[in-house]
């Protein structure tokens, strides 16, 4: 009897455990890819997404171009892209899901002091017109008085936001910087794969310094480059994705690249430059400065965004980007459409807000991006 009872208890326990660890019957593993900019954010948000939805989406972003291809050929349920899809398929829509700063990442060898660079100087560096760190323009940017932003905060120390979701500036304070720059050549790492990050940076350069950047923005940095980038292999080195260019800069003293803020931290440990904006303020790329830029942007009825690169908002970071969720209005399956809608709603409303260290802006409900996202989201499954 004791043996029989023990076996029964063991069997019951086994059934209980199988129930606990069995896959949720309604759980879905979504096929998603595209922009590498959101790799860190998706990793940070994954556990919360799974807990809230019961679903999963293994994400390994390899580039916005791959995301566009995936939504076009049906290998992805939705995709992320940091640039507008200029050739969408029937029923495809853009949802402005995230706002973030394109950070300028630098390796000056053992010199870990802060670096400030104006938008005009950066345009010339990435165009190959400034090729040395001791160029007079870089020296001038780093030996001057600049204004830095002091934000208004609440009782808990959080930055207060206005109705558009932009940080409220309390005041600016003047800081004098002195930084002797190394007498070394600059090595520029750029993305070789089609990249929305490249598109956003070259779009800003073309607007801010049209005499320098004489070609229109493009997902291909080499295509947007004002010249033939292959003719200068000494100063320009290509790598596929954000992690690749960050690794290249990590391994190469006196180099520079552009990527998401997260690629400045461990294991890369790169210097993240402050960028001197249109108001003359040295701006650190983060969620607050990107939302300041977003508050000056135009969000169209189709969900696409145009940034105002000539704005003089004191807190705006000049190189700010949008990540779009590319989705379909008709998935041919009402349940699938509803599932995609649920997934995208969670990601846009929670990921940036819950993971501020990733540098993505958090939308308020009255922000134009949030309103446009909700409007586009309502079209899914219609």
Image (cartoon, rainbow, N blue to C red):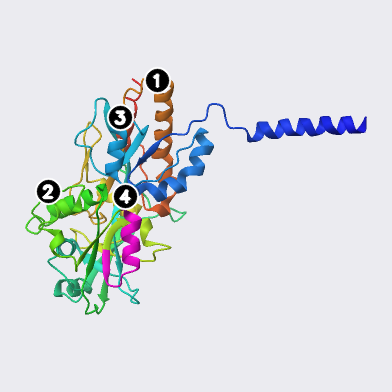
- Residue holding disc 3: 376
Q: Nearer the viewer, residue 69 or 302?
A: 69
Mark number displayed over residue 187: none
Horizontal and vertical percent for residue 220? 20, 49
Cβ atoms under marks 4 and 1 closer than 8 Å:
no
Q: Residue at x 47, y 54 (%)?
A: 156
Q: CA distance from mark 3 to mark 4?
A: 20 Å
Q: Residue 376 in magenta?
A: no
Q: CA distance from mark 2 to mark 4?
A: 22 Å
- Residue holding disc 4: 100
Determine the image quadrant of residue 324.
top left
Quadrant of the rendering where the N terminus is positioned: top right
- Report whether residue 368 is seen: no
Q: Earlier in the sequence, mark 3 or mark 4?
A: 4
Cβ atoms under marks 3 and 4 closer than 8 Å:
no
Horizontal and vertical percent for residue 4? 88, 30
Q: Earlier in the sequence, mark 3 or mark 2?
A: 2
- Report whether residue 230 is seen: yes
- Residue holding disc 2: 216
Q: CA distance from mark 1 to mark 2?
A: 40 Å
Q: Residues within 10 Å of mark 3 (few under 14, many from 20)?
A: some
Q: Which residues are magenta?
A: 241-256
Instruction: Name the side, left or right, on which 119 lies relative to 286.
Output: left
Per the image, label 1 sits on a secondary structure element best described as loop
Q: CA distance from mark 4 to mark 1?
A: 33 Å
């Amino acid at each position: 009897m004791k043996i029989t009872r023990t076996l029964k208890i063991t069997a019951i326990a086994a059934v209980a455990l199988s129930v606990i660890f069995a896959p949720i019957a309604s759980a879905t593993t979504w096929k998603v890819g595209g922009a590498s900019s959101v790799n860190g954010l998706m990793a940070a948000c994954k556990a919360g997404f799974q807990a809230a939805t019961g679903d999963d989406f293994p994400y390994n972003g390899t580039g916005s171009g791959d995301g566009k291809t995936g939504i076009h050929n049906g290998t992805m349920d939705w995709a992320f892209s940091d640039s507008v899809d200029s050739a969408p398929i029937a029923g495809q829509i853009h949802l402005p899901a995230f706002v973030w700063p394109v950070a300028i990442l630098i390796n000056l060898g053992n010199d870990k002091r802060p670096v400030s660079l104006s938008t005009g100087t950066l345009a010339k560096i990435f165009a190959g017109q400034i090729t040395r760190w001791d160029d007079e323009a870089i020296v001038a940017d780093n030996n001057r008085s600049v204004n830095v932003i002091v934000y208004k905060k609440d009782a808990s120390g959080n930055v207060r936001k206005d109705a558009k979701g932009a940080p409220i500036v309390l005041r600016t304070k003047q800081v004098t910087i002195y930084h002797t720059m190394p007498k070394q050549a600059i090595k520029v790492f750029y993305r070789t794969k089609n990249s929305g990050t490249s598109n956003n940076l070259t779009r800003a350069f073309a607007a801010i310094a049209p005499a320098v950047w004489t070609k229109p923005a493009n997902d291909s940095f080499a295509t947007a480059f004002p010249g033939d980038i292959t003719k200068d292999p000494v100063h320009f080195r290509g790598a596929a994705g954000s992690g690749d260019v960050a690794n290249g800069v990590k391994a190469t003293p006196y180099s520079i690249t552009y990527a998401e803020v997260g690629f400045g931290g461990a294991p890369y440990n790169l210097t993240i430059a402050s960028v001197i904006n249109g108001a003359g303020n040295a701006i650190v790329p983060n969620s607050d400065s990107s939302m300041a830029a977003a508050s000056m942007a135009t969000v169209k009825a189709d969900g696409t965004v145009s940034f105002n690169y000539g704005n003089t908002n004191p807190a705006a970071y000049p190189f700010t980007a949008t990540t779009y969720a590319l989705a379909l209005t008709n998935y041919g399956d009402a349940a699938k459409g509803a599932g995609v809608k649920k997934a995208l709603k969670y990601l846009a409303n929670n990921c940036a807000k819950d993971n501020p260290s990733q540098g993505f802006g958090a939308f308020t409900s009255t922000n134009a991006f949030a309103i446009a996202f909700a409007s586009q989201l309502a079209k899914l499954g219609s």
